[in-house]
Amino acid sequence: MAAELRVLALQSPQLIINELAARFTRESGFTIVELLDIAELPAHARRRIDAGEAFDAAFIEDVQLDALAREGKLIGATRRNFLRVPIGVAVKTGAAKPNIDTVEAFRHAVLAAKSVAYLNGGRSGPYLQDLFARWGIGAAIGAKERRPDTDTVGELVAAGEAELGITAIATLMATRGVEVIGRIPAAIQSYVCFAGAVGAAARMPEGAKALIDFVTGPAALPVIRAKGMEAWADGTPAN
């Protein structure tokens, strides 16, 4: 029987880890047990860690990970940059796709949509809310927005509850019933960045380190790119 690694990973890291899990198990002898539901947000991960959740490795947002390392809940020396995830836009499968190629085109698409879904929290939600406010369209968007507390933006679009969905592009690509239009324009892009580290109370620290090395190594690159994300190499700016 393979030894179990308890992994606390947020949605975008999970998409990569799950894709590579079988190969990692064959090569390392460790099986991966996911501790978070795939739609859970950083605040949920933080609460579970603060409540004493036992885990071997964490793959969470970089700022949160660094704070937990300072608090002694993660081993800072094992920290590795992992993913950068851009914000994308999607519509329901078969629906017309608005032009989002330029900043003005994206602004027009958001204003023209009958309803818009984006997160209430996380990184992208507050960023988009602030962006709309700076554009002077916050009130117009607020009257028709759907803002879930977990990343079910794609599901809202697929169900017809929102005409336009704006969230991490990897999440949208993994959602059935939606078509991804693309990323928001580079001039207003904001990345959600994830890093990995070994838990301070890890029962399998060597296995956790092996997993971090594996998913940040060359074997993961094709999977990362296929899912609309970018490998976040050390030294690459977060935004």
Image: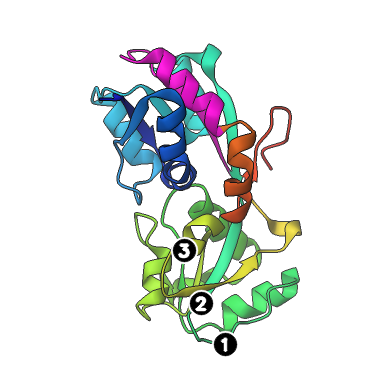
Residue 36 versus residue 4: which sits nearer the camera? 4
Task: Please report contact status of discs 3 and 2: CB closer than 8 Å, yes or no.
Answer: no
Tag 2: amino acid: Val
Location of mark 1 (residue) = 96
Residue 162, label in figure: none
Q: Residues within 10 Å of mark 3 (few under 14, many from 20)?
A: many
Can residue 228 be seen from the camera position used here?
A: no
Point out residue 43 in the picture as x, y percentages from the top left corner.
Answer: 36, 39
Q: Residue at x 54, y 29 (%)?
A: 214
Residue 118, label in figure: 3
Residue 91, label in figure: 2
Task: Please report contact status of discs 2 and 1: CB closer than 8 Å, yes or no.
Answer: yes
96 shown above or below 158 = below
Point out residue 106 in the picture as x, y percentages from the top left corner.
Answer: 67, 73
Discs 3/2, front: 2
Instruction: Mark 1 or mark 3: name the one nearer the start of the chain.
Output: 1
Under circle 3, the secondary element is loop
Query: Residue 34 falls in which quadrant of the image?
Result: top left
Tag 3: amino acid: Tyr
Q: Which residues are magenta?
A: 192-215
Q: Residue at x 58, y 39 (%)?
A: 220
Q: Residue at x 29, y 36 (%)?
A: 35
